[in-house]
Amino acid sequence: MRLRPVSCILAATMVAFSAQADISLLTGPDNAPFTAATWPEQGIFTELVAAALAASPAPEPHSITWQDNWSSQPDLIKSKAYDMAFPWGQPGCEVTAADDVRCTDFHYSEPVIDVVILLFVRADDEFEFDQNADLAGRTLCRPSGLLTHDPNGFEAQWLPNDTVKLRQPQTLGACFDLLMAGRVDAVAVNEFQGVQHMFAAGLTEKVVPLTRPLATQSLHVVISKTHWRGTALMYRFNAGLAKLKQTGAYAEILSRHIAIYWERLKG
Amino acid sequence: MVRLFFYILVLCGFGPGNVMAQACGGDYEVARGDSLSLIANRLYKDAGKWTAIHTVNRSVIGEDPDKILVGTRLELACINGLPKGMSPRGAVSGERLKLDSVSPGTNVSEPSVPPVRSTPLRVVTGDDQAPFSDHRLPQGGMLAEVMDQALQRGLKSRTVKTFRINDWASHLEPLLTGDLMDVSYPWPKPDCDDLSGAPICQAYAFSDPMFEMLMVMFVDADKPVPLANTEDIHGKKLCRPAGRMVFMLDAEGRGWLRNGLIELVRAPTVAGCFDLLVRGDVDAVVVNEFTGRNAVATLGLTDRVTPLRNTPLGIVTLHAVVSKQHPQSQKILAALNDGLRKLKRDGGFQDILDRHLSAVWAGL
């Protein structure tokens, strides 16, 4: 299975638009299993967002735009070119990053999915990771194009970055290439995408994920705090998401996608 | 202490070019022997119109309409084409307008009535609606600025006079219904198909929405009363600032007020409601999340009062309203909506919201 077929790149610029749409959403492609045009229902996250909006009080139709430049999302949301964007990691607004523009300028939904960030290392590397201090002097790789649109942002809270070097190529594949070339010590990515890439690139014998997670990252839908419907749209979304969890629809969607995920790994 | 029904009237000029001479209405200086009803009888041909003079001039007259001082300058609004021959509002003139300059027999027939377009559109708003409308906020508040800019774009040549009258109840009745004002804002729009909103919708027409938010209950953080179910709410005292709509208490099948499930307490102001809450005299304050959170922060109650954001009383939109009895209600709303669309298109709307809401969130 190839992760990034040409059709996916084309889909990146494809705008799925309904003339009647009231809520416009922005996401990025090539982010399986979360948001990807090639994934059933266009990804776990995409399906959860659509289902939450459909289950929200006073629901309104929505449209989703696929924009392949993740780093443009903050500006497009701030300028209100689109109402909401996903998925975004929350930069620790309650703790360390209260003054960060991503905290001062955006409302974050309740977590839609929590993902575990693991370190993927070379199988022959004796990589000790019992505490964060063990990372001192190591070079980690984290792609800039996956989930994180701001490479200097939310990692800072869980990477002791004065002692850890971070490489940020565009793609996850480039990170694994650097890992296999011995240029970085570990790839830091959520377990879904890391394992997925191990299988896709035939690295299952050469790379292992460390069992101790580097961090847990919650992924959210965001809206500008100066949007004229900011809190109301966010309430709609959160209430819809809560309803999905209450009715079991959330669990159904998640387990269905996880089944697809494992099928695709084998396939 | 804030007094109930205390009117503050602030005349908001939108720059010197906007306040134009009126062919009807204007300034009047109180003479010896005057009373409001005498003035009303002479100039409006209707002694009962003294209430209109009082309403518009409460900031200079005060609460007691019988106490007017010789030499006080009163503004006389143009009502049904009267009074005529007044000095324009704000005109520099040392000359006192004599009562007898308009004799009881003065002809007020139609030909002298100016074309409607030349009379300013009378817009009324009030304070205590932060961040939407309050004269202490920059530009009088976020929606004051939106209204100003939208009307400039929508009305073409017609000018606007904006008044601040803090007795919100008076806006709908009698100011709009009595044709003393043309437009009032901001008001939440009820569900017109619901029993709770139908009477309001029958009497008033709403502009396009200018803002959307949650109507929530603020409760004492130490007494997190579960107020989500009908059983929980039974017998509770809910405070709502005076003059603000209460449809949300009955909407979505609640019928809290209609069925006597709750006791509605009216405080003169938003702060007054929160005073009652922290004193334990009411169980919750019902107010929109923005005005409520602003008051909580201003009053230093952030640790004591919490909004029940997960169980809001509804999603409401804010609008300008006109009386459906107003002969130009449709025309006025069409112009305002046109102005709002233009304002959204040219980016002005977002500029205004960015400025005001950034300050709001920074302060919370």
Image (cartoon, coloured by chain):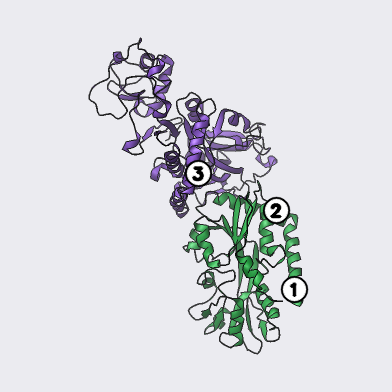
Chain colours: A green, B purple
Query: Residue furthest toward the left?
Result: B94
| Disc 2/disc 3 C-alpha distance (Å) | 35 Å
Which quarter of the image is occupied by the C terminus of chain A?
Answer: bottom right
Q: Would residue A93 be visible to someone looking at this image?
A: no
Q: Amino acid at mark 1?
A: Arg
Residue at the spot x=62%, y=46% of the render? Answer: B225
Closer to us: mark 2 or mark 1?
1
**Chain-order first, disc 2 or disc 1:** 2
- Helix, strand or loop under label 2: helix
- Gap between marks 3 and 1 measured at Cα: 49 Å
Which residue does the numbered mark 3 point to in the structure image?
B341
Amino acid type shown at disc 2: Lys
Task: Between label 2 and label 3, give the one nearer the viewer.
Answer: 3
Mark nearer the viewer, 3 or 1: 3
| Of residues A148 and A72, the one drawn nearer to the viewer in this rendering | A72
Q: Position of residue A249 (x, y in %)?
A: 74, 57
Horizontal side of B222 relative to B128 (left or right) equals right
